[in-house]
């Protein structure tokens, strides 16, 4: 991946064409998306590397969640989206999922009235191996709480259920939206550890506001401002540039891990 030039977010179009990483699992070019007649994504290019974690960063409201929803086909979109080189831009959500794009939404979306094991069972995709060994290794607590109603779990435990559902099937890539949002610091660390393990099994596109988590996990970073991708490059290089993080995220980070 090459590091792109970064235009001033406030000064005109931010056309970036150097999002390429070698053999990405998922590629997006010129993505636009609409919600209720309003354009919420204007022009996003991004590549998700075939291994590890690619972070999708930006201030509140710049279009990170909308980008992920557009990839999943959950909101109206146009532009090019390819999975393993296959065009998926016009496919409905269930076909995108069937092709191996796992989605862990921001609000977790567990079925509250169902037990933990029922939440996992209904996520099983026909014709796929189901990786219960992996998820019970990653989340031993879910085995212990198999019969507990998911709605009675803590936020951190519900996040584990949501991640476990996406890991259960043999996905090609996971789109994970703000998994640490609203969690206590200890749980943030737990989720970070689980994501690191998950990323050993499947590449991850991660929307994350906690920059320490990004620093710990991400290899690559794509940054949005105003519905546009304006920076692509190694995550550490981005986070070690306080001027850039100040300009694009509104926070100044340093190289000492003070993200
Ligand atoms: N259902 C909706 N109706 C109207 N506008 C929406 C809707 N969903 C998102 N938007 C708008 O689209 C823009 C992008 O929102 P989005 O949630 O994608 O941003 P984000 O970068 O994920 O923000 P955050 O970090 O706060 O979650 C925002 O201006 C938001 O207000």
Image: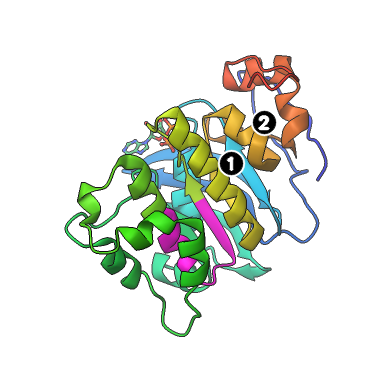
Local SS, label 1: strand
233 shown above or below 195: above
218 or 77: nearer the eye? 218
Say which residue appears at 53% left-offset and 66% top-offset: 134
Answer whether labels 2 and 1 touch (C-beta < 8 Å). yes
Let me know if residue 75 appears in the view: no
106 shown above or below 143: above
The residue carrying mark 2 is 14
Say which residue appears at 65% left-offset and 41% top-offset: 217
The crowding category of the residue bearing disc 1, from other C-alpha atoms within 10 Å (few below 14, some 14 to 19, many at least 20), is: many
Gap in angstroms between the C-alphas marked 2 and 1 = 9 Å
Stretch of the chain drawn in magenta: 163-175
Q: Position of residue 75 (x, y in %)?
A: 39, 52
201 shown above or below 248: below
Say which residue appears at 78% left-offset and 52% top-offset: 21
Q: In this view, does 183 lie to the left or right of 85?
A: left
Disc number for residue 43: 1
Q: Where is residue 235 in the image (x, y as percent from the top left)?
A: 72, 35
Q: Quadrant of ligand 1?
A: top left
The crowding category of the residue bearing disc 2, from other C-alpha atoms within 10 Å (few below 14, some 14 to 19, many at least 20), is: many
Q: Does the magenta stretch include residue 166?
A: yes
Q: Is residue 58 magenta?
A: no
Local SS, label 2: loop
């Amino acid at each position: 991946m090459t590091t792109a030039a970064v235009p001033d977010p406030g000064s005109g179009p931010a056309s970036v064409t150097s999002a390429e990483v070698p053999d990405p699992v998922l590629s997006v070019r010129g993505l636009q998306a609409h919600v209720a007649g309003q354009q919420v994504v204007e022009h996003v290019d991004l590549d998700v590397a075939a291994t590890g974690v690619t972070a999708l960063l930006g201030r509140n409201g710049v279009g990170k969640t909308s980008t992920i929803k557009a990839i999943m086909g959950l909101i109206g979109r146009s532009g090019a989206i390819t999975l393993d080189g296959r065009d998926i831009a016009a496919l409905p959500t269930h076909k995108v999922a069937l092709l191996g794009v796992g989605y862990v939404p921001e609000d977790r979306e567990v079925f509250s009235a169902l037990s933990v094991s029922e939440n996992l069972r209904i996520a099983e995709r026909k014709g796929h191996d189901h990786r219960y060994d992996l998820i019970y290794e990653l989340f031993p607590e879910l085995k212990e709480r198999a019969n507990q109603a998911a709605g009675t779990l803590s936020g951190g435990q519900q996040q584990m259920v949501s991640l476990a559902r996406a890991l259960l099937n043999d996905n090609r890539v996971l789109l994970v939206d703000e998994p640490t949002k609203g969690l206590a610091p200890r749980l943030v660390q737990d989720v970070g550890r689980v994501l690191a393990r998950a990323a050993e099994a499947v590449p991850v596109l991660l929307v994350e506001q906690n920059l320490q988590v990004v620093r710990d996990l991400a290899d690559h970073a794509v940054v949005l401002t105003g519905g546009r991708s304006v920076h692509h490059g190694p995550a550490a290089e981005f986070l070690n540039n306080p001027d850039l993080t100040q300009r694009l995220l509104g926070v100044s980070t340093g190289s000492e891990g003070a993200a």
